[in-house]
Image (cartoon, rainbow, N blue to C red):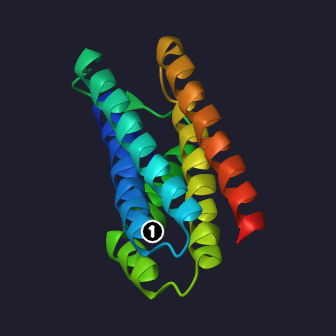
Amino acid sequence: METFFSAHEITDMAVTTEETGYEFYKLAEKNALSENTRQLFAYLADEEINHKHIFKGLKDTIEENPQGVPVGREDVGKYIKAMVDSSIFMGKNKNINFTLESQNDKDAIDFALGFEKGTILFFYQLKDMVKSGVKDIIQKIINEEKEHIRRLTEMKKLV
């Protein structure tokens, strides 16, 4: 059975990843032990909100095909659905519980690195399922997510 996602569904998935990231980073900011780590998490939370607005704006510009857009490769569609349904993206309680139970900044940074890596994988797959004009926007966000990983990795060396 082939998996179908409409363009609106795809942008909704992207918005959800950004909302989940925002919630995590705001809690991580609140619970950070050092001021530098707190500032990094505040910055990353702001970035998630910026990305969310980009995707919401994209959704408003899409003329939807009522039948949805076929993914074309069944495995990719299943992968995307599994990613969005996973605890990293949809498990807000997992993010909240982890953040509240985290004993140190290093653990929170490690969790954030995993979240960012998962987000990048998601966006690479998403990029394969959109029109060329949107690919550039998604690539820009992928590049920003890579920068988040770089910043988190640098901060991890300091804690």
Does residue 56 lie above or below 83 as drawn?
Answer: above
The percent position of residue 88, horizontal first and vertical second, equals 47, 65
Residue 36 position in % (x across, y down): 58, 60
Q: Nearer the viewer, residue 64 or 29?
A: 29
Residue 72 seen in the current view? yes
- Residue 89 occupies quadrant: bottom left
Residue 63 visible from this viewpoint: no
Q: Is residue 102 above or below residue 66?
A: below
Compared across the picture, whether 56 is left or right of 14 comes to left
The residue under the point 49% across, 72% down is: 32
Q: Residue at x 57, y 26 (%)?
A: 140
Residue at horizontal 56 percent and vertical 73 percent from the top = 108
Residue at the spot of label 1 = 28
Q: On the rendered image, what quadrant is the C terminus found in?
A: bottom right
Residue closest to the far front? 35
Residue 154 locus on image (x, y percent):
74, 55
In the image, what residue occupies the spot 48% across and 34% down?
A: 71
Residue 3 versus residue 92: which sits nearer the camera?
Answer: 92
Q: Nearer the viewer, residue 56 or 62?
A: 56
Three-letter amino acid code at disc 1?
Ala
